Amino acid sequence: MSTTRIDETHDPKLTSWVESANESATDFPIQNLPFGRFREATDLDWRIGVAIGDQVLDLRKAGLVQTHEMNRLMRLRPQTRGELRSALSKGLSKGSAQQTKWRDALVPMARAQMGLPCQIGDYTDFYVGIHHATAVGKQFRPDNPLLPNYKWVPIGYHGRASTVNVSGHAFPRPSGQIKGPQDEVPRLGSSQRLDIELEIGIFIGRPNAQGQPIPITEAEDHVFGLALFNDWSARDIQAWEYQPLGPFLAKNFASTVSPWIVTLEALAPFRRPFTRPAGDPQPLPYLDSTQLRDHGAFDIALEVWLQTEAMRKSSAAGDRISRSNFADAAYWTVAQLVTHHTVNGCSLSNGDLFGSGTLSGPRPEQAGSLLELTEGGKRPITLSNGEQRTFLQDGDAVTLRGHCKRAGFRRIGFGSCMATVLPAGSQAATPLTDTDDDDE
């Protein structure tokens, strides 16, 4: 598969004439080249851009595409995507003949307003984090935390695409029906157990026809790339409503995605073999392949940062409260999610988004949610300024970060995925997205 091939675009010695891309701390060296949608203050339409250092390359202005529609680009076949990546790499390399022409197609990130990476049609949230599933299950079923189907079938539910927002937005604390353990009847109120969910977002590029499942050996050909994703949860609303049909208002009030899609081609050096713990059942044949076992997992280091309103007022950056890794946390792979989603004949559409589910590591301090970090609110965490948290308070800003690092290759990153909690009933402060997009 082209998405697993390591080639000249991954060469760690490769440098760019965009000098900021050569800095060791950048998320966006020339070896990355993630895609996103941006515009400047005077623009009406979104443009397709590629991140390079602290700049955005306008692909249409550079003459690389003839469209401003990201979804159309995402439908490209893997071979054509690889050719585009190669052209970008050569044109942005130091000494390139394209330097003079392409310099005029650069926009400083500080001047670019980022939109959703693409037009999102449908959103499915999975539950691949086995350590998260186990930790949460123990709070309700200490002797049997995982339900019998967990190790056999990728669990998921249909989410709400209309409330997926790009990094940088703010959203009001959700309200819904809540019934505490001592309450005789439920009441309508604002959630007091608002939580984070550290996830990876998976963007579908190529669709499949209804009734035609995607084989596991072809699944990644339908994936354009990955992003950071926070699927916020109202745990008190969730506890009352989730039986018998699962998540509803506790999940669909807001989700946050980072603006840059890191392609599978860029992630080729950072794959790991996919293995199951000894004694666990092996995947059913439709969810298994030699390719999957050889390099089906992605080694992505993940972090959660929390900045309270008091920290922000004192110009403190906030605290890192958790870190984990996609490969260590996920019991199911990206390819398995695609194949299982379509095995019944379900059609995926260009621009569909999958959430991985909460990606907690095996140790308590690697939890990807406050529900785990605080043991359901029983053990508050203490922050560097002395404040404590069980769940999120108004004014809290949560930022997810992710990067890939491996000896012999250049470190690449995902940028950040950030949003701020507003008081219940507030007006959501959301960057303009597709509601005023005349291009789609």
Image: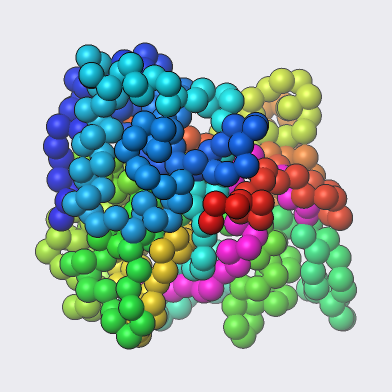
- Residue 161 on image: x %, y %: 58, 64
Q: Is residue 368 visible?
A: no
Quarter holding residue 344: bottom left
Instruction: Say which residue appears at 40% left-offset and 38% top-offset.
Output: 60
Q: Does the magenta run of residues contain 155?
A: yes
Which residue is depicted at the point 36% across and 51% down? Answer: 73
Between 271 and 10, the one lying in front of the other is 10
Residue located at (39% from left, 77% from top): 347
Compared to residue 403, the image places residue 79 above or below, namely below
The answer to whether 213 is drawn above or below residue 352 in the figure is below
Numbered-mark total: 0
Give the colouring mode of the picture. rainbow
Quarter of the figure with the N terminus: bottom left
Foreground: 181 or 32? 32
Query: Is 286 rendered above or below residue 79?
Result: below
The image position of residue 194, as x and y in percent, is 71, 55
Question: From the viewer's perspective, is 161 left or right of 27?
Answer: right
Q: Quadrant of residue 104?
A: top left
Residue 161 position (above or below residue 387): below
Residue at 86% over, 55% down: 425
Image coordinates of residue 325 in percent, x first then y, are 38, 45
| Percent coordinates x, y for residue 96 in the rendering | 23, 19
Q: Is residue 258 magenta?
A: no
Give, as a single range, the part of the protein colored magenta.
154-173
Residue 241 shows up from this direction: yes
